[in-house]
Protein backbone atom coordinates (compact mmCIF):
# COMPACT_ATOMS: atom_id res chain seq x y z
CA UNK A 1 0.00 0.00 0.00
CA UNK A 2 1.44 3.36 -1.07
CA UNK A 3 1.60 5.97 1.71
CA UNK A 4 -0.34 9.14 0.98
CA UNK A 5 1.77 12.24 0.49
CA UNK A 6 4.72 10.44 -1.13
CA UNK A 7 5.03 13.00 -3.92
CA UNK A 8 7.66 11.26 -6.02
CA UNK A 9 7.02 8.99 -8.97
CA UNK A 10 10.36 7.27 -8.47
CA UNK A 11 9.87 6.58 -4.76
CA UNK A 12 6.33 5.41 -5.42
CA UNK A 13 7.69 3.08 -8.09
CA UNK A 14 10.25 1.59 -5.67
CA UNK A 15 7.61 1.04 -2.96
CA UNK A 16 4.96 -0.30 -5.33
CA UNK A 17 7.30 -2.80 -6.97
CA UNK A 18 8.95 -3.85 -3.69
CA UNK A 19 12.41 -3.19 -5.08
CA UNK A 20 14.93 -4.31 -2.49
CA UNK A 21 18.26 -2.71 -1.53
CA UNK A 22 20.90 -3.76 -4.01
CA UNK A 23 18.46 -4.21 -6.86
CA UNK A 24 18.61 -1.94 -9.88
CA UNK A 25 15.95 0.29 -11.33
CA UNK A 26 15.07 0.28 -15.04
CA UNK A 27 16.85 2.79 -17.23
CA UNK A 28 15.75 6.41 -17.22
CA UNK A 29 14.13 5.96 -20.61
CA UNK A 30 12.25 2.87 -19.45
CA UNK A 31 11.08 4.63 -16.28
CA UNK A 32 9.93 7.60 -18.33
CA UNK A 33 7.78 5.38 -20.55
CA UNK A 34 6.39 3.28 -17.71
CA UNK A 35 5.59 6.23 -15.45
CA UNK A 36 4.33 8.43 -18.26
CA UNK A 37 6.54 11.36 -17.28
CA UNK A 38 9.33 13.19 -19.06
CA UNK A 39 12.94 12.04 -18.99
CA UNK A 40 13.91 15.33 -17.35
CA UNK A 41 11.44 14.74 -14.51
CA UNK A 42 12.80 11.22 -13.97
CA UNK A 43 16.34 12.63 -13.79
CA UNK A 44 15.27 15.30 -11.30
CA UNK A 45 13.52 12.81 -9.03
CA UNK A 46 16.44 10.39 -9.19
CA UNK A 47 18.78 13.19 -8.17
CA UNK A 48 16.58 14.02 -5.18
CA UNK A 49 16.50 10.34 -4.21
CA UNK A 50 20.28 10.20 -4.56
CA UNK A 51 20.71 13.27 -2.32
CA UNK A 52 18.53 11.59 0.29
CA UNK A 53 20.68 8.45 0.11
CA UNK A 54 17.83 6.30 -1.20
CA UNK A 55 19.49 5.34 -4.49
CA UNK A 56 23.00 5.19 -5.86
CA UNK A 57 23.60 6.35 -9.42
CA UNK A 58 26.67 5.13 -11.28
CA UNK A 59 27.56 5.96 -14.87
CA UNK A 60 27.11 3.01 -17.23
CA UNK A 61 25.91 0.73 -14.43
CA UNK A 62 22.54 2.29 -13.67
CA UNK A 63 20.62 3.17 -10.51
CA UNK A 64 20.70 0.88 -7.48
CA UNK A 65 18.30 1.08 -4.56
CA UNK A 66 20.06 1.59 -1.22
CA UNK A 67 19.13 0.41 2.29
CA UNK A 68 17.02 3.03 4.04
CA UNK A 69 19.15 5.57 5.86
CA UNK A 70 17.56 8.56 7.59
CA UNK A 71 20.87 10.35 8.15
CA UNK A 72 21.23 12.06 4.73
CA UNK A 73 17.76 13.62 4.91
CA UNK A 74 18.20 14.65 8.55
CA UNK A 75 21.68 16.05 7.88
CA UNK A 76 20.56 18.06 4.88
CA UNK A 77 17.66 19.53 6.84
CA UNK A 78 19.71 20.50 9.87
CA UNK A 79 22.46 22.08 7.76
CA UNK A 80 19.81 24.12 5.97
CA UNK A 81 18.39 25.16 9.35
CA UNK A 82 21.85 26.25 10.55
CA UNK A 83 22.24 28.29 7.39
CA UNK A 84 19.04 30.12 8.27
CA UNK A 85 19.85 30.62 11.95
CA UNK A 86 22.83 29.25 13.84
CA UNK A 87 20.84 29.12 17.07
CA UNK A 88 19.15 26.03 15.63
CA UNK A 89 22.29 24.12 16.59
CA UNK A 90 21.33 24.38 20.25
CA UNK A 91 17.76 23.37 19.41
CA UNK A 92 18.98 20.29 17.56
CA UNK A 93 21.44 19.52 20.36
CA UNK A 94 18.55 19.33 22.82
CA UNK A 95 16.78 16.83 20.56
CA UNK A 96 19.92 14.73 20.21
CA UNK A 97 20.46 14.74 23.97
CA UNK A 98 16.92 13.54 24.58
CA UNK A 99 17.31 10.77 22.01
CA UNK A 100 20.56 9.49 23.54
CA UNK A 101 19.15 9.53 27.05
CA UNK A 102 15.89 7.86 25.98
CA UNK A 103 17.55 5.02 24.06
CA UNK A 104 20.68 4.59 26.20
CA UNK A 105 19.65 1.47 28.11
CA UNK A 106 18.33 -0.32 25.05
CA UNK A 107 21.40 0.53 23.00
CA UNK A 108 24.26 -0.21 25.40
CA UNK A 109 22.77 -3.55 26.41
CA UNK A 110 23.49 -4.68 22.85
CA UNK A 111 27.19 -3.80 22.84
CA UNK A 112 29.78 -6.54 22.42
CA UNK A 113 33.18 -6.90 24.16
CA UNK A 114 34.94 -5.63 21.03
CA UNK A 115 32.85 -2.47 21.22
CA UNK A 116 34.02 -1.83 24.78
CA UNK A 117 37.62 -2.34 23.70
CA UNK A 118 37.14 0.13 20.86
CA UNK A 119 35.57 2.70 23.22
CA UNK A 120 38.53 2.40 25.59
CA UNK A 121 40.93 2.93 22.69
CA UNK A 122 39.07 6.09 21.69
CA UNK A 123 39.53 7.45 25.21
CA UNK A 124 43.28 6.83 25.05
CA UNK A 125 43.54 8.55 21.66
CA UNK A 126 41.49 11.51 22.86
CA UNK A 127 43.59 12.01 25.97
CA UNK A 128 46.75 11.90 23.84
CA UNK A 129 45.39 14.75 21.73
CA UNK A 130 44.46 16.77 24.79
CA UNK A 131 48.02 16.44 26.08
CA UNK A 132 49.59 17.59 22.83
CA UNK A 133 51.17 21.01 22.49
CA UNK A 134 49.24 22.71 21.03
CA UNK A 135 46.17 20.88 22.26
CA UNK A 136 44.00 19.26 19.57
CA UNK A 137 40.25 18.98 20.06
CA UNK A 138 39.49 15.23 19.65
CA UNK A 139 36.42 15.74 17.49
CA UNK A 140 36.61 12.44 15.62
CA UNK A 141 37.09 10.43 18.82
CA UNK A 142 34.15 12.31 20.38
CA UNK A 143 31.90 11.55 17.42
CA UNK A 144 32.87 7.89 17.20
CA UNK A 145 32.51 7.32 20.93
CA UNK A 146 28.93 8.56 21.09
CA UNK A 147 27.91 6.78 17.89
CA UNK A 148 29.51 3.53 19.05
CA UNK A 149 27.29 3.43 22.13
CA UNK A 150 24.31 3.26 19.76
CA UNK A 151 25.83 1.37 16.82
CA UNK A 152 23.91 -1.89 17.40
CA UNK A 153 20.54 -0.25 17.90
CA UNK A 154 18.36 -1.17 14.92
CA UNK A 155 16.35 2.02 14.72
CA UNK A 156 17.10 3.99 11.54
CA UNK A 157 15.48 7.17 12.86
CA UNK A 158 17.55 7.23 16.03
CA UNK A 159 20.67 6.49 14.00
CA UNK A 160 19.80 9.22 11.52
CA UNK A 161 19.28 11.89 14.17
CA UNK A 162 22.50 10.98 15.98
CA UNK A 163 24.57 10.94 12.79
CA UNK A 164 23.04 14.22 11.64
CA UNK A 165 24.00 15.79 14.96
CA UNK A 166 27.67 15.15 14.30
CA UNK A 167 27.38 16.55 10.79
CA UNK A 168 25.94 19.71 12.35
CA UNK A 169 28.55 19.66 15.11
CA UNK A 170 31.37 19.53 12.57
CA UNK A 171 29.79 22.37 10.59
CA UNK A 172 29.03 24.57 13.60
CA UNK A 173 29.75 22.95 16.95
CA UNK A 174 33.51 22.96 16.42
CA UNK A 175 33.23 26.72 16.55
CA UNK A 176 32.23 26.45 20.20
CA UNK A 177 35.58 26.02 21.82
CA UNK A 178 35.93 25.73 25.57
CA UNK A 179 38.88 25.86 27.92
CA UNK A 180 41.18 22.85 28.18
CA UNK A 181 39.90 21.88 31.63
CA UNK A 182 36.42 21.54 30.17
CA UNK A 183 37.56 19.12 27.46
CA UNK A 184 39.42 17.01 29.99
CA UNK A 185 36.36 16.92 32.23
CA UNK A 186 34.27 15.77 29.27
CA UNK A 187 36.58 12.84 28.69
CA UNK A 188 36.47 11.92 32.37
CA UNK A 189 32.72 11.53 31.92
CA UNK A 190 33.27 9.51 28.77
CA UNK A 191 35.53 7.14 30.67
CA UNK A 192 32.92 6.76 33.40
CA UNK A 193 30.28 5.96 30.80
CA UNK A 194 32.45 3.31 29.16
CA UNK A 195 33.48 1.65 32.40
CA UNK A 196 29.91 1.59 33.69
CA UNK A 197 28.78 -0.12 30.49
CA UNK A 198 31.70 -2.55 30.73
CA UNK A 199 30.45 -3.50 34.23
CA UNK A 200 26.84 -3.58 32.95
CA UNK A 201 26.00 -0.71 35.26
CA UNK A 202 23.77 0.87 32.64
CA UNK A 203 22.08 3.18 35.14
CA UNK A 204 25.45 4.54 36.23
CA UNK A 205 26.41 5.08 32.61
CA UNK A 206 23.13 6.90 31.99
CA UNK A 207 23.76 9.20 34.94
CA UNK A 208 27.28 9.97 33.65
CA UNK A 209 25.84 10.70 30.21
CA UNK A 210 23.24 13.05 31.67
CA UNK A 211 25.79 14.91 33.80
CA UNK A 212 28.08 15.12 30.79
CA UNK A 213 25.31 16.71 28.72
CA UNK A 214 24.55 19.25 31.43
CA UNK A 215 28.07 20.67 31.36
CA UNK A 216 28.29 24.31 30.37
CA UNK A 217 31.46 26.27 30.00
CA UNK A 218 32.42 29.62 28.59
CA UNK A 219 35.53 30.10 26.54
CA UNK A 220 38.71 31.55 27.97
CA UNK A 221 41.33 30.74 25.36
CA UNK A 222 40.48 28.58 22.32
CA UNK A 223 42.54 25.45 21.88
CA UNK A 224 43.83 24.30 18.50
CA UNK A 225 41.43 22.56 16.18
CA UNK A 226 42.06 19.62 13.91
CA UNK A 227 44.45 20.55 11.06
CA UNK A 228 42.73 22.78 8.54
CA UNK A 229 39.95 23.87 10.92
CA UNK A 230 39.48 27.63 11.22
CA UNK A 231 39.43 29.04 14.74
CA UNK A 232 36.15 30.97 14.95
CA UNK A 233 34.83 33.74 17.22
CA UNK A 234 34.14 33.13 20.90
CA UNK A 235 30.78 31.54 21.81
CA UNK A 236 29.38 29.81 24.88
CA UNK A 237 29.92 26.07 24.56
CA UNK A 238 27.03 23.65 25.00
CA UNK A 239 27.94 19.95 25.04
Image (tube, rainbow, N blue to C red):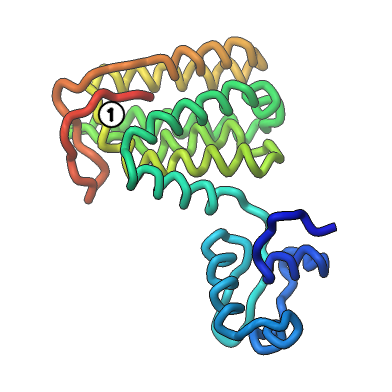
Query: Picture coordinates of residue 111 (x, y %)?
Result: 67, 31
- The residue at which mark 1 appears reads as 130
Q: Residue at x 56, y 59 (%)?
A: 52
Compared to 113, does 170 lie above or below? below
Rendered residue at 47%/26% (across/down)? 94
Residue 80 % position (x, y): 40, 49
Q: Is residue 116 above or below residue 4?
A: above
Up-down relation of residue 237 to residue 67 (above or below): above
- 110 or 22, which lies in front? 22
**At 33% from the left edge and 45% from the top edge, which residue is drawn?**
84
Direction from residue 154 to residue 92 in the image, left or right: left
In the displayed structure, does residue 187 sit left or right of residue 64?
left
Q: Looking at the rendering, which quadrant does residue 148 occupy?
A: top right
Quarter of the image with the N terminus in it: bottom right
The quarter of the picture where residue 108 lies is: top right
What residue sits 49% from the left and 33% below the top? Answer: 145
Residue 230, image x, y percentages: 19, 45
Dot 1: what SS? helix
Which residue is at the front of the view, 3 or 239? 3
Query: Which image quadrant for residue 155?
Result: top right
Q: Is residue 179 left or right of residue 37?
A: left
Amino acid sequence: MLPSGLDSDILQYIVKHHILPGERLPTIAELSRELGVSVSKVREELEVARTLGLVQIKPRTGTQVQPFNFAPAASLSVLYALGLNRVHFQDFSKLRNSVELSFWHEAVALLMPEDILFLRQLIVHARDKLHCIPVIVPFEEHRRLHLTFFKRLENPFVQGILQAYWVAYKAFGLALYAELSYHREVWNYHERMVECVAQQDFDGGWRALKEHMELLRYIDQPVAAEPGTEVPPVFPFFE
